[in-house]
Image (cartoon, helix red, strand yellow):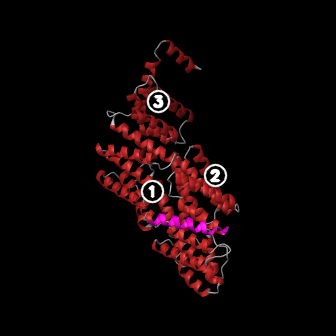
Amino acid sequence: MTRSYAFEKLVASNEDESIAARHANFSIQLLESNPTDLLKLRSAEAVPNSLQDYLGNVRAALEWSFGANGCDRTALRLAAAAARLFLSMSLYLECRNWMEKAINRITSDCNPQHQIEIHASFAWSLMFTEGNSTRVRAAFDTALNLAQRYEDARQQLRLIAALSIYSHRMVDVAATLELALQSEVVAKKTGDPDDAVIADSLLGAAYQLLGDHVRSQKHSELALRSPPGLGRFNESEYLLDPRTLALLCITRSQWFTGKLDQARCYAEITIEEAEKSGQMTTLCRSLIWAMPIYFWVDDLEQVERRLSRLELTAQKHSLEPFRSAALGLKGRYLIRTGQTIEGIQHLRDSLEKLAAQRYAIYVPDLVTALAVSLAEQNSRAEAVALLDKSIAVQVDANTALHLPALFLAKGQALASGDKPDIQSAEENLAKAMTFARQQSALSFELRAGLELARIWIERGEVQRAHDLIGPIYGQFTEGFRTPDLVLAKEMLNRKTLRVGLARV
């Protein structure tokens, strides 16, 4: 009421435009002078009303600046200053919309730093609300070219990191590794410990795509060993959270290499830290990357709880690629809980959406689940075709990470249905074990071995099955209460094997 009355008085005195201009300039000065402190406004300790009042002022200033009586120079400077505030508050759609308006106003004499911030923030928010479109790549490239032209090392590293994440999401292995190596070069030039942390986290992610868990874990662990007193990275400031990325890589490496108890522990730590960060993209990524581990150890209670959090968060913040991934994870959960037909449809819909969004990193996990379920419904030809296509994509991309899972699923699919092709199933399970050994992926080697052992035991080759499983089981040092290890021990002790093996 008071504000409305005051505004009416300003309009009546013809001072509203001059006051609006002063207000916009004040907002710019506040955003530019205290960027770090302002980013802390998003924390749980912030006073909600104060935050909303401040955000309301920024929005009002943007509305005037981009309006009929506004000023392009002011609008661009304000948009650049406000971008990180929007990102820090997970207002991705709003950030995307304002940055797009700003891009349409950019002229050749626009401040290069403002241009870099606007293009980078537009690309980041667009990537998480729409997917990995060519517009995202173009905006990142524009910002990076400007940073290189003006020799801004900090912005170069920031944008190289963002492009590496973009390439990682598309499973462009060559680009992901090349960008990670570029980040290492820039970090060595700056000598900044923060920059070294970013580079190591990117290298950890890149080597993991190659299936090199040893080098991945080495760099990921280095990224976690930041000097004492180094503050937590803010995703809106750096366009990624290297600590979370490193934790996620270690989580997956521990899972693959058979350290299942540690993998679950890291998954919990990662999600807990992501919750505290206030960054919704960080939280969604953490939930999605942790979910396959819960499926692997058959912890459906955790799947249900984490899935609910993911669905609500992705929907609330319009994070469409994460909603697509959540749809697929829901499909896996439905299949596990006996709702196979509905689950299969969820998986189909998810894969269709992810393809449109060019979001390939989660596709293999969903393809394996869909293919095995289709084969069990006597749709083996479709299942094998899906797997062959996914295997070809992985081979063409030169990424070995998912090959153990894909050949394992193919073996399971061929062994399923009314007329199983046992010989082909054995061949593919053997391939799964070979690829798993090459990656030191002990968890996948055991699961593929258990499937192969089941086939051999059913035709009376019990000792052969024992000889296969015994040495693999002996390499495990933890996770003995997880389904595969319980099953392996039972087989070794009883010289028999249940038919019901865990799913991929």
Q: Identify the residue under disc 2.
A: 308
> Label 2, label 1: how many angstroms apart (C-alpha)?
25 Å
Q: State which quarter of the image contains the N terminus.
A: top right
Which span of residues is magenta-colored? 376-395
> Label 3, label 1: how many angstroms apart (C-alpha)?
34 Å
Between 476 and 294, which is closer to the camera in this rendering? 294
Check if mark 2's residue and mark 3's residue have beta carbons within 8 Å. no
Left of 465 or right of it: where is 234? left
> Label 2, label 3: how many angstroms apart (C-alpha)?
35 Å
Farthest right residue in view: 338
In the displayed structure, 120 sits above or below 196; it is: above
Is 256 one of the magenta-colored residues?
no
Q: Identify the residue under disc 3.
A: 62
Give me the disc on residue 168: 1
Between 20 and 432, which is closer to the camera in this rendering? 432
Q: Residue at x 33, y 38 (%)?
A: 112
* Circle 3: residue type: Leu
What percent of the width, then of the height, locates residue 225?
41, 58
Which is more N-terminal, label 1 or label 3? Answer: 3
Q: Secondary structure at mark 2?
A: helix
What percent of the width, then of the height, locates residue 392?
48, 66
